[in-house]
Image (cartoon, grey):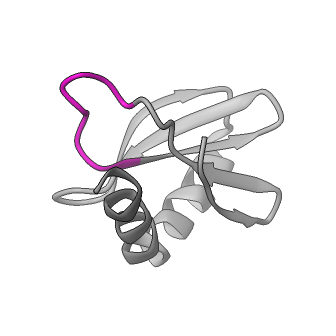
Amino acid sequence: MPVVLRLEGFTFFFYSNEGNPREPVHIHVRRGRDEAKFWLRKEVAVAYNEGLTARDLNRVGRIVQDHRDLFERAWHEHFA
């Protein structure tokens, strides 16, 4: 589980086994037991949310948008 970023109590990561065939580029985010997944292409979009409040989900969405290039770069480097 490569961790790409820790910020504001959230951990942004992806799983090393992202399906076969591999799912499109995305990032998972966790805080405590709560987790969400965001697609990064074509636009940032929530794939699922398990436990994050609407306020946290909005905040995380802005963080994902702000760090999208970092997340995409880490994804491609890991799965190259």
Q: Residue 4 appears in which quarter of the rendering? A: bottom right
Rendered residue at 51%/67% (across/down): 62
Q: Is residue 28 above or below residue 67?
A: above
Residue 79 horizontal side relative to residue 63, left or right: left
* Outermost front residue: 80
Residue 75 horizontal side relative to residue 35, left or right: left
Percent of width and height locating residue 5: 65, 65
Q: Nearer the viewer, residue 7 or 18?
A: 18
Percent of width and height locating residue 79: 33, 51
Q: Which portion, as a residue range, is magenta?
A: 18-26
Q: Nearer the viewer, residue 38 or 17?
A: 17
Rendered residue at 56%/68% (across/down): 63
Rendered residue at 59%/50% (across/down): 2
Report the predominant secondary structure element of the magenta stretch: loop
Q: Work out which quarter of the rendered image holds the N terminus and state it.
A: top right
Rendered residue at 47%/77% (across/down): 66
Percent of width and height locating residue 68: 40, 70
Q: Work out which quarter of the rendered image holds the C terminus and state it.
A: bottom left
Q: How many marks?
A: 0
Q: Residue 6 appears in which quarter of the rendering? A: bottom right
Q: Nearer the viewer, residue 17 or 28?
A: 17
Percent of width and height locating residue 24: 23, 42
Q: Is residue 53 above or below residue 9?
A: above
